[in-house]
Image (tube, helix red, strand yellow):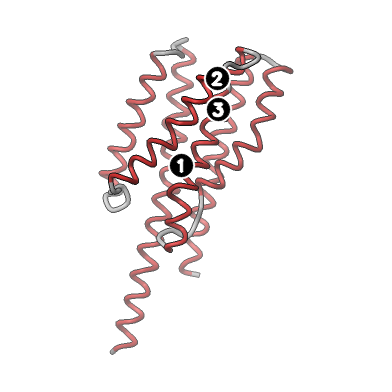
Amino acid sequence: MVEEVARVADFAEKLRRYFSTVASAIAFFVFGMVCGGYWLIMSSLNLLFPWAVLGMIVIVILCLYSMSKALPGRMEVPRHEGLRWIFAFVAPFTVLYAIPLPDPRLYTISWYLALGIALLLVHLLIERREFARGSIVAKPFLVSSITMLVTYPLIVYMLYAGSLISSWMFALGLLLIAYFVAGVYALNRASKLFS
């Protein structure tokens, strides 16, 4: 009887870790699709700044709200952790868009670098601790941030070898690939809990 209870408890713990990790994977798929689609629509309508940026904030809030309804246990975070999330995403964008760049065209692709840094900050401030606690079994924020930071020079090259719009579209395409890789990686790691 005691062994059976121990097996059930172990299974329940694996299931909790599995669902938490899968929720992270789903977040990358959701945000990749919604944000990628949003920016493609905004660019086709020539509505990029500042209205599209303000709209993006609304889109992110709507995504978080809908995900909190679909994944209720995963989206409940303590207030101090919520502040870490906000800091992780606001700080890199604020800094990169506040500093003067040698070529103003770099501002059109700086979002990619800022997002890569933001994802790395999420890993350092939140994900790493959750992984160490055993709450999750993957580090998709680390994977996506490394992918983006390593590929940023390609986007800069595209800006100078190609054009402004081609480098922006290239960055958006690489973002979608980075999010896909992070999501699949997290799903793969989660599935290994039951192998």
Q: Quadrant of the N terminus?
A: bottom left
Q: Amino acid at mark 3?
A: Leu
Q: Which residue is mark 2?
A: 99
Q: CA distance from mark 1 to mark 2?
A: 29 Å
Q: Amino acid at mark 1?
A: Phe
Give the x, y percent position of residue 156: 67, 24
Q: Is residue 59 left or right of residue 120?
A: left
Q: Which residue is mark 3?
A: 172
Q: Earlier in the sequence, mark 1 or mark 2?
A: 1
Examine the rendered structure and indicate whether residue 138 appears above or below residue 101: below
Q: Who's the residue at 46% across and 14% down the image?
A: 48
Q: Secondary structure beneath disc 2?
A: loop
Instruction: Say which of 133 and 172 sits in front.
Output: 133
Examine the rendered structure and indicate whether residue 39 appears above or below residue 190: above
The answer to the question of whether label 3 and label 2 lie on touching residues, with beta carbons closer than 8 A, is: no
Instruction: Say which of 181 and 103 sits in front.
Output: 103
Give the x, y percent position of residue 174: 59, 33
Q: Who's the residue at 63% across and 18% down the image?
A: 166
Q: Secondary structure beneath disc 1?
A: helix
Q: Which residue is mark 1?
A: 28
Q: Earlier in the sequence, mark 3 or mark 2?
A: 2
**Dot 1 crowding, Cα within 10 Å, few <14, some 14–19, many 20+:** many
Which dot marks residue 124?
A: none
Q: Amino acid at mark 2?
A: Ile
Q: Is residue 55 left or right of residue 131?
A: left
Q: CA distance from mark 3 to mark 2?
A: 23 Å
Name the quadrant containing residue 61: top left
